[in-house]
Amino acid sequence: MRVAVDEAIPYAQAAFAAAGEIRLFSGRSIRPEDLSDVDALVVRSVTRVDARLLARSAVRFVGTATIGMDHLDLDYLGARGIRYANAAGGNANSVAEYVISALLATAARRGWRLAAKSLAVIGAGRIGTLVAGKAAALGMSVLLCDPPLRESTGDRRYGLLDDVLGADVLTLHVPLTAEGPYPTRHMVDRQLLRRLSGRQFLINSARGAVVCGPDLKVALRERWIEGAILDVWEGEPGIDQDLLQLVDLGTPHIAGYSQDGKAQGTAMILDELCRFFGITAAWDGRCIYAPAQHVSPEPGMAGEGAVRSVVLQTYDIRRDDAGLRAVTGMPASAAGEHFDRLRDRYPLRPEFRHFVVEAPAGSGLAPVYQALGFQVADPAQTAAGLREA
């Protein structure tokens, strides 16, 4: 069996090697002729999979190592009898940790106290649920918005969009859809932004086109809202550099780029491929993780500041923001290449669970760190270890 795999998918060679012959390709430049004798195709969101790409191919299985599937022509794949799969939930925790780092970094910059802020989680699936739990651990008042989930479950905890528009921060975790009763393409447009106020803030780590970029640019320039954080952009990799200059934090579509998220995504697609073709190809991804690292709040930090100190030591979103801002002034083609290079060569970050926090005794923060996903050292054991050392 021949498997074509995007060369930028982490751990792909090791994971798919037992499944057959591996052919690596560039996600943005793969051609139909590259797939003439390929049985399975594994892609990222940068590759549009449709009739143009597959019409003359032998592909029977398409897997995308992403949550979203808006880059797959599902009608075409279904009509051709081509099995498809995604990695739904694989990088959910990574995205949730991205949002927490973003909130804490922005709170420091803006002088907020997060415990005094409310957060609207728009889209209460796997990612949104994790974001809600971690934000609540920071003391934020959390509102959930998910009309389809409200309809399917009857659970009125999941509000309508109108129910949550008063929140201080709105974070988007919805799929990109253009049809149905709740389309999300340009869900955040001029009309919605005009309903917000200068004290409100927007975070988008879902899909770029959920937010109308030109309308957001006007909203930020005219101060209809306080600010925004964007990890996803319309027209990637050719992002709007003027919009980048207006947001508080801008990153190159890497919210889900943790070691854990990427390994889980790859493993999920491998499992689906094996199930479809009836083969066995085990891969143990635990070997990729380094031993747990110990981290402590900076001296003199307490409360939210101590939590921020720990989080930004383990994942400092500001470094990713600085890397993307290097596109400033570049011609469009060079800026697009830079955006792709940041993604393709991204140093995958370990998730919070790979860190042990040594919280000072009596700080009362151990439950907060644990709710965010960290391990917490036993203060008595830590003190004993220090005495022995």
Image (cartoon, rainbow, N blue to C red):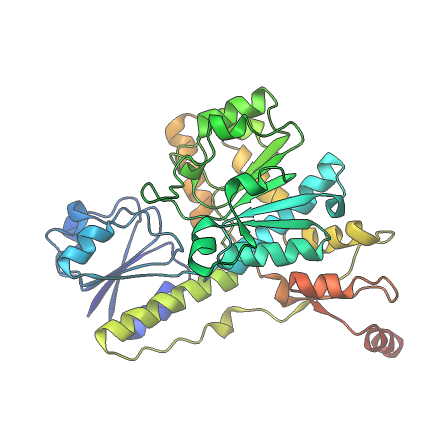
Q: Quadrant of the N terminus?
A: bottom left
- At 74% from the left and 40% from the top, the residue drawn is 108
Residue sitting at the far left? 56
Q: How many marks?
A: 0
- At 58% from the left and 51% from the top, the residue drawn is 98
Q: Position of residue 383 (x, y in %)?
A: 87, 74
- At 59% from the left and 30% from the top, the residue drawn is 196
Residue sitting at the far top? 222
Q: Is residue 348 visible?
A: no
Q: Position of residue 190 (x, y in %)?
A: 48, 26
Residue 169's quadrant in the figure? Answer: top right
Q: Position of residue 256 (x, y in %)?
A: 49, 53
Left or right of residue 336: residue 94: right
Q: Position of residue 231 (x, y in %)?
A: 51, 42
- At 32% from the left and 47% from the top, the residue drawn is 70
Decide: is 195 above or below 118. Answer: above
Decide: is 344 above or below 226. Answer: below
Q: Quadrant of the C terminus?
A: bottom right
Q: Viewer-proximal residue, 121 or 265? A: 121
Decide: is 186 above or below 137. Answer: above
Q: Is residue 343 visible?
A: yes
